[in-house]
Image (tube, helix red, strand yellow):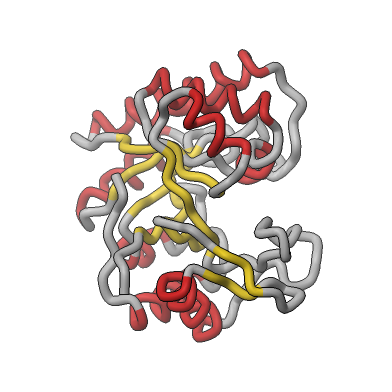
Amino acid sequence: MRMVDLNCDLGEGFPDDARIFPLISSANIACGFHAGNVDSMRRAVALAMSHGVTVGAHPSYRDRAGFGRRPVEILPDELAEQVLEQIEALRSAARLEGGEVRYLKPHGALYNRIAHDPEQADAVARAAATADLPLLGLAGSAIDAAARRHGVPFIAEAFADRGFLADGTLVPRTSPGAVLSDPEEVAERVVLMIETGTVQASTGEIVPVDARSLCVHGDSPDAVALLTAIRRRVPTVEAFA
């Protein structure tokens, strides 16, 4: 079985962070715009360091009320500045703990938008280039292309706990089958992704998945159970950064 990274969104105010860190290899830490503050960033970095987990910045639109899941219309230059502001906030917190931010993975609505919006994707890629950080995102998407244009290393990811459509995009959260919660089902999907490079879409089609990193959402009440089941089937994971 080939080696993969297992990443999770953390520092978002949910109760299971301390139980999740031992199960993952990379942590996407909220930088204050959708969740988190200096104290939560410092705690998350300290936990990551104690478990040998790589720290990544998890910036979003400025949308605490909507947890970063609402689309925002914003000029590209302003978006680039906001992403850089969040990276620097996490870097400052990490320095206080003796840690380092190693990559960038956008959150929520921003993540989804830059998968198909070339202008916003370019803004995020410019921010990553300025910050000298690799980008984690959806393979074959607008952000993948933008990262390559700006000379930013790009790491493709897939979601262990989300349903896929036949075109390889995620089932919208408002639709049935969007979020997967059965630990054994999710673990089996992960093994198939790793061994065959494919996943079954919600409509039955077999979809190619080219991913170096797999994500489980830390805000899911089933996150610990899902990650535990995955690690039973995939005993060793390795950070990409």
Say above or below: 42 vs 232. Answer: above
Nearest the eye: 87 or 103: 103
Seen in the image, is 17 located left or right of residue 120? left
Position of residue 184 measured from the top left corner of the image (x, y, whole percent): 50, 86
At horizontal 58% and vertical 46% (from top left) the residue drawn is: 140
Can the viewer see residue 37? yes
The C terminus sits in image quarter: top left
Say above or below: 57 vs 15. Answer: above
At horizontal 70% and vertical 39% (from top left) the residue drawn is: 116
At horizontal 72% and vertical 73% (from top left) the residue drawn is: 202
Going by the picture, which residue comes out furthest to the top? 77
Say above or below: 86 vs 174. Answer: above
- Residue 97's quadrant in the figure? top left
Seen in the image, is 200 located left or right of residue 73? left
Position of residue 56 measured from the top left corner of the image (x, y, whole percent): 38, 41
Position of residue 75 measured from the top left corner of the image (x, y, whole percent): 70, 17
At horizontal 35% and vertical 59% (from top left) the residue drawn is: 5
Nearest the eye: 157 or 230: 157
Can the viewer see residue 218? no
